[in-house]
Amino acid sequence: MDHTASPLSPAEFAAFHRDGVLVLRGSLAGERLDHLRSSAMEIRRQAEAGGWGGVRIAPGFEERVGAAGVPPWTEMTWGIGEITRPGLHDPTLINALAEPRLHGALTSLLAEPRAWGQKILWAPRGVDYDLFWHRDINTEFDPVMPYKPAGIQDHIQLNAALEKDSAFIVVPGSHRRRMTAVERATIDADRHAKLPGEIRIELEPGDVLLMDAHALHRGSLPAGHPRLTLHFSLQAQWVPLKPWGDAQSFAWLTGAGFIDGLDPTIREWYRRLTTANKDTHQYTYLVEQARRAGWTPDPGWRMPGTDPYQGSKKKRDASAAPTSPAITNHG
């Protein structure tokens, strides 16, 4: 693999911080793209064969698996999480992060990237995919969004399209401000409604989307539309690491058996999991930054948990598939 990293240009860097989204066109191509697509399709096949936890069911259908008039669960899946698990892990997919354009962009934005989560996303065959508006952070942090320091990025979510992907809808610039009164009223009335300024991102195979997941975003595709996308979550090493997973999974992800199979340029991104500062309240730093910048919380405001859907009656819309004999985790 060519290890000559291709960092973001000053214009790209500025555009990402302004909008919270940036598309890198044609970042993956040729045989490399073909191999990634083949590996991802195989993991989808395994996921829909049953026996793996973390398989995602289309929003609104999680509690209806097996009900009369509902398609089989295999026709309602839209992805699977934590593809680094033994039995699912294919180093080919993780090594996409070592591609020069991806590696350079992530290093430009995070300085010392730390790997976090890896998924494969697709479109359900039998039902529409329609995920509600949200930020990937608890809504109680909304007041501190305007105080995120300019030019400093704490995390990146990355979508690498292996097929065409037009699922992602976002409100550019919403990652560094509070929700407006119009946005809040619209979402309260209909969590799938059109918002002022929203755009739909159209990705061709090989395109890569970088995003700040604190932006207002959602996903939507009609049943059967093409989509096969690698999804990565990464953080800057200075960000506290919240406890996650079990000890066995953490040991695998940070052990030689996993890391030695990765491209040398990204091995440190996983080793950093073992040296990161730990904090149950992962976003304490956002609150501290806001206070230093002059923010005074309303009386009664308390540090919320880190679950972005905490307190939502519709948390299930973004949850994993319910436990069933076909979807129980045997891994």
Image (cartoon, helix red, strand yellow):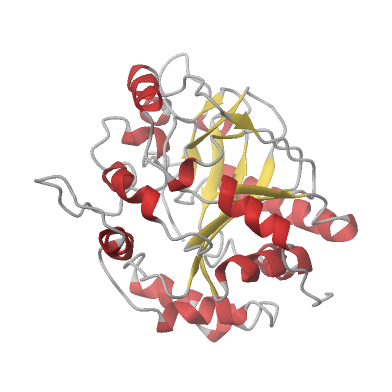
Pick the front one: 21 or 130: 21
Residue 157 position in % (x across, y down) = 55, 54
- The structure residue drawn at horizontal position 68% and vertical position 80%, both measured from the top left corner, is 265
Q: Looking at the picture, how far across and down is residue 31, in whole percent?
A: 89, 59
How far from the left and from the top, in percent, is residue 224?
68, 26
Give left or right: position of 201 versus 100.
left
Outermost residue, top side? 69
Q: Which corner quadrant holds the N terminus?
A: bottom right
Q: Is residue 118 visible?
A: no
Q: Position of residue 35 (x, y in %)?
A: 81, 58
Q: Nearer the viewer, residue 108 or 27?
A: 108
The residue positioned farthest toward the left in the image shown: 300
Q: Quadrant of residue 134?
A: top left
Residue at screen point 30% across, 58% down: 290
18 relative position to 240: left or right: right
Horizontal side of 242 relative to 222 (left or right) equals left
Residue 172 seen in the current view:
yes
**Vertical relation: 297 (above or below) 106:** above
Q: Viewer-proximal residue, 257 or 319?
A: 319
Front one among 192 and 41? 192
- Residue in the picture at 51% in, 62% down: 153
Could you tell me which residue is drawn at 60 percent across and 23 percent down?
126
Vertical position of residue 86 compared to residue 40: above or below: below
